[in-house]
């Protein structure tokens, strides 16, 4: 029940991102291509938020996904899109610079 209310009010559940990444999670950077070219985390996947719906096939549904952007706002939108499309284990990682 707490998870339902957290999602309803936009609060994120705490996750151990380092553990998720060590176990094969996908780090999805939803910044623009230009932002990504300037600086990015090694081994992350760049799919800009505005093209996410058209590139869902690039993501695996059986792996956790951690979405990141510059501040956490676009990654929050990406999480909502992915959950609506059936991705079950998706997290808002906030800023890419945290990784």
Image (tube, grey):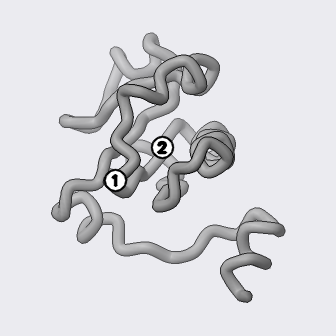
Taking depth in this image into account, of 93 and 98 the one nearest to the observer is 93
- At label 1, counting other C-alpha atoms closer than 10 Å, the crowd grade (few under 14, some 14-19, many 20 or more) is few
Query: What's the residue at 55%, 25% (across, down)?
Result: 52
Label placed on residue 68: 2
Vertical comparison of 9 with 76: above or below: below
Image x and y of residue 62, in percent:
34, 53
Find out whether the residues at labels 2 and 1 contact each other: C-beta distance under 8 Å: no
Taking depth in this image into account, of 28 and 81 the one nearest to the observer is 81
Which picture quadrant has residue 21?
Answer: bottom left
Vertical comparison of 77 with 63: above or below: above
Residue occupied by mark 1: 62
Query: What's the residue at 58%, 44% (across, down)?
Result: 82
Query: What's the residue at 47%, 61% (across, down)?
Result: 89
Quick one: which residue is furthest to the right in this view? 9
Vertical comparison of 2 with 88: above or below: below
N-terminal of the pair, mark 2 or mark 1, is 1
Image x and y of residue 10, in percent:
76, 63
Which picture quadrant has residue 75?
Answer: top right
Vertical comparison of 38 with 82: above or below: above
Element type where label 2 sits in the image: strand
Label placed on residue 33: none
Query: What's the residue at 20%, 55% (across, down)?
Result: 24
In the displayed structure image, the side of residue 46 where residue 78 appears, left or right: right
Element type where label 1 sits in the image: loop
Image x and y of residue 4, in percent:
74, 77
Rounded to the nearest angstrom, the CA distance separating label 2 from label 1 is: 19 Å
In the displayed structure image, the side of residue 85 where residue 10 appears, left or right: right
Mark in the foreground, 2 or 1:
1
Image x and y of residue 23, in percent:
19, 63
């Amino acid at each position: 029940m707490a998870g339902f209310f957290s999602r309803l009010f936009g609060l994120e559940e705490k996750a151990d991102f380092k553990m998720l990444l060590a176990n094969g999670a996908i780090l999805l950077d939803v910044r623009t291509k230009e932002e990504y070219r300037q600086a990015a985390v090694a081994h992350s996947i760049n799919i800009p938020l505005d093209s996410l719906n058209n590139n869902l096939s690039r993501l695996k549904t059986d792996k956790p996904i951690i979405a990141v952007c510059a501040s956490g706002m676009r990654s929050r939108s990406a999480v909502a899109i992915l959950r609506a499309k059936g991705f079950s284990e998706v997290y808002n990682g906030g800023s890419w610079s945290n990784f």
